[in-house]
Image (cartoon, grey):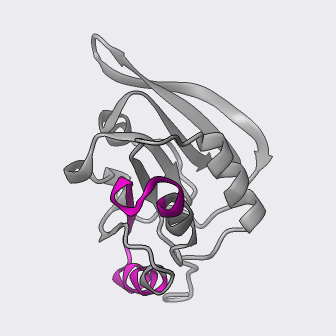
Amino acid sequence: LKDGELVSSSSQPSLMALMLDALDVADGHTVLEIGTGPGYNAALLAHRLGAPAVTSVDLDPEITESARAHLAAAGYHPTVITGDGARGCPERAPYDRIIATCTLPSVPQSWSEQCRPGALILAPLATGLVLLEVRATAHGPRAEGHFLHTPAYFVPLRGAL
């Protein structure tokens, strides 16, 4: 809690597993995680893909510092950045997968712009998870997809959305 507002939490492990399964990561993929939390999800991704392939962003420096410590204690060293997840992390783009562990009112266009064609974006919108595929078009990247049949409740994204 910060100023009476919940700013971070650890998601239910079974929901995180479902989300990672839906993300369908494969060898060679790079992943951007929005909402670092305690670092558990980043550790799972780093274990699967290798730490250099994983970037995690959170707005709160206390959260990112704590996550780095948790990750290091577990032997993982993905890139953990203190920054506005709403803008993604263009300096480490392009990504094959983006996963958000915070609720969004909409998926930022900047995320699609940081993806390779064919990339997937998985994010909580309202009370459900949306899975989008990024396609290249003449007018720039376009993300289209569907809601998964899984209710999900997360802390709202904080940042300039």
Of 65 and 130, the residue lying toward us: 65
Q: Toward the viewer: 14 or 7?
A: 14
Q: Quadrant of the N terminus?
A: bottom right
Instruction: Write the residue at 55% across / 81% down.
Output: 5
| Residue 57 is covered by the magenta coloring | yes
In this picture, residue 7 sits left or right of residue 128:
left
Q: Quadrant of residue 67?
A: bottom left
User: 129 left or right of 28?
Assistant: right
The answer to whether residue 53 is above or below residue 78 is: above
- Magenta span: predominant SS is helix
Observer-nearest of 117 and 158: 117
Q: Position of residue 14 (x, y in %)?
A: 77, 61
Q: Against 43, is 153 above or below?
A: above
Please name whichever residue, 80 or 85, is drawn nearer the observer in this view of the structure. Answer: 80
Can you say whether 46 is above or below 10 in the image? above
Residue 82: x percent and y percent?
Answer: 31, 72
Residue drawn at (37%, 53%), measured in percent from left and top? 53
What residue sits 30% from the left and 67% below the top?
83
Residue 136 on image: x %, y %: 35, 18
- Report the residue at 73% width, 67% height from top: 13
Mark yes or no: residue 19 visible. yes
Q: Which residues are magenta?
A: 46-70
The x, y position of residue 94, in whole percent, is 29, 40
Kindly give the residue lying farthest to the top in the view shown.
138
Asked if residue 79 lies left or right of residue 41, the reply is left
Magenta stretch: residue 52 in it? yes
Q: Residue furthest left?
A: 91
Answer yes or no: is residue 126 visible. no
